[in-house]
Amino acid sequence: MNSRPYQVLTLSLRKQQRLGSLPALVAMLSANFAEQRNSCYLYIVMLSTNVTKKRIKDPVCSYLRTLISPYGFGWKGDDGVGRYSNETLIRYYNTSGFMGSPTNDELHNHFTGQDTLYFWADGRKSTPLTISMIDIDCHRSGNPESAKAFADWLRDNYFPSLYHEPSTHGKGRHGYFVLFKDGFGDVAVSNILKRLEKVLKKLLQVFRATHPELVFCPFCTHSHQPIRLPRW
């Protein structure tokens, strides 16, 4: 066993003189490189955190999107209902895989009355549910009080989950309900709603007989026309 003390290898004086400040320069460059590498790693970690940050989901908006068509929506414009052109929707679908449904911010602006959005019901056979609307129209006759009374009566007696609110111009009433349509497409649903409209007209006669003091409004059911989304 070697009993001599451990010796640290050092450069000879002549070699130190010959190298000059080169070792110190190499040490300084190594420290700068390590610092830049750590900074780069920190930047990558921060960037990855921002990229993987998930958007907070709104359960109301998420549920509403499952009831409306994923192939576009409309909005209130100066000349009626505006919508994206077919060319724009096709480009969205080819580049992003979808054709455009309202964002959470757009839906929130609609709920608060800042904007007005319109929808088409989901007419695909593979979707079990869609949203439809009963439009109680009072443009030519009737008044808001009568429209609300009829909507309340429908909800209390026939549509327990019916949600209704004032129409776009405030004269009539919009009633919304979720239709279970599993296996039926847009054509079949449209025919079902036409039959429902005939039933509602008979129910209106019953309501008029028991509420003679009210002035009544005509109405119709909608599903696949551009319909105003509920404000909820």
Image (spheres, helix red, strand yellow):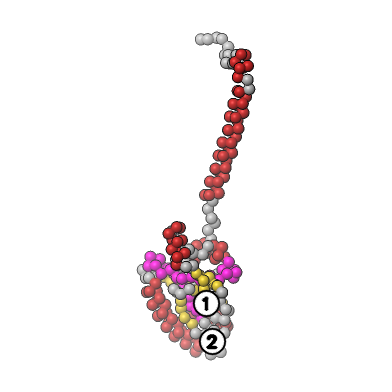
Residue ID at (57%, 83%): 145
**Pick the front one: 100 or 12:** 12
Q: Relative to residue 25, is residue 209 drawn left or right?
A: left
Mark 1 vs mark 2, CA separation in Å: 16 Å
Circle 1 Cα neighbour tier, 10 Å, few/some/many (<14 / 14–19 / ≥20)? many
The secondary structure type at the circle numbered 1 is: strand
Residue type at mark 2: give it: Arg
Locate residue 181: give its quadrant: bottom left
Give residue 127's position: percent from left, percent from top: 40, 66
Can the viewer see residue 111? no
Circle 2 Cα neighbour tier, 10 Å, few/some/many (<14 / 14–19 / ≥20)? few
Quadrant occupied by the C terminus: bottom right
Q: Which mark is residue 174?
A: 1
Region in magenta: 109-136
Residue at the far left in the pictured view? 183
Residue type at mark 1: give it: His
Which residue is under mark 2?
A: 140
Give residue 101's position: percent from left, percent from top: 49, 64
Locate residue 108: give its quadrant: bottom right
**Pick the front one: 92 or 126:** 92
Give residue 36's position: percent from left, percent from top: 59, 36
Give residue 183's position: percent from left, percent from top: 36, 68
Residue ID at (54%, 43%): 44
Lower position in the chain sequence, tag 1 or tag 2: 2
